[in-house]
Image: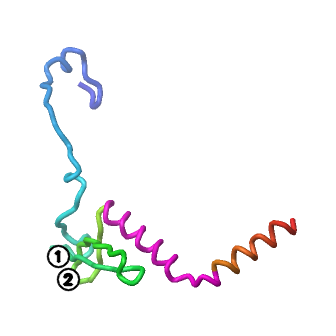
Amino acid sequence: MEEGNLSLEELEKLKKIKTQVDNSFFKVTEGICPKCNEKMIKVIENDSLFDGALTFHIIKLRCNKCKKEYMDLEQAEKYDMFLALKKISEKKPIDFVSNNLFHKILVEAN
């Protein structure tokens, strides 16, 4: 038998199994630091925006030795959303108006 190429007889001998995958398979709840080979601890970082009207709870894994932090995909997406909203919240209204006005002038000039 060549690797990756099974005959019909070999395929018929294989057993069928049922598996189910739910979202919990994609959540990272523990880990070992790839740099230090130390067990990482779970840390929940709470960040608020808009004077506390919106709060983000970001779950990270942190290495106590090198202090590097890691997130699973879901937490990274949530953190990206937080950073985007934080950037918007820090813009002053006058910056927004002046930037739009400047853009409009450039577009009309061309």
- The disc placed on residue 64 is 2
Q: Residue at x 76, y 76 (%)?
A: 102
Nearest the viewer among 104 and 69 is 104
The quadrant holding residue 76 is: bottom left
Q: Residue at label 1?
A: 41
Q: What's under tag 1, amino acid-wise?
A: Ile
Question: The N terminus appears in which quarter of the rendering?
Answer: top left
Q: Residue at x 25, y 18 (%)?
A: 7
Q: Position of residue 74 (x, y in %)?
A: 32, 60
Labels 1, 2: front one: 1
Residue 86 located within the stretch drawn in magenta:
yes
Instruction: Report the colour scheme.
Output: rainbow
Q: Taking 39 as reference, is 51 above or below it?
A: below
How crowded is the residue under tag 2: few (<14 C-alpha within 10 Å), some, or many (20+)? some
Q: Taking 69 as reference, is 92 above or below it?
A: below
Residue 76 located within the stretch drawn in magenta:
yes
Magenta part mainly helix, strand or loop? helix
Q: In the picture provided, is 107 more to the left or to the right than 91?
A: right
Q: Dot 1 lies on which element?
A: strand
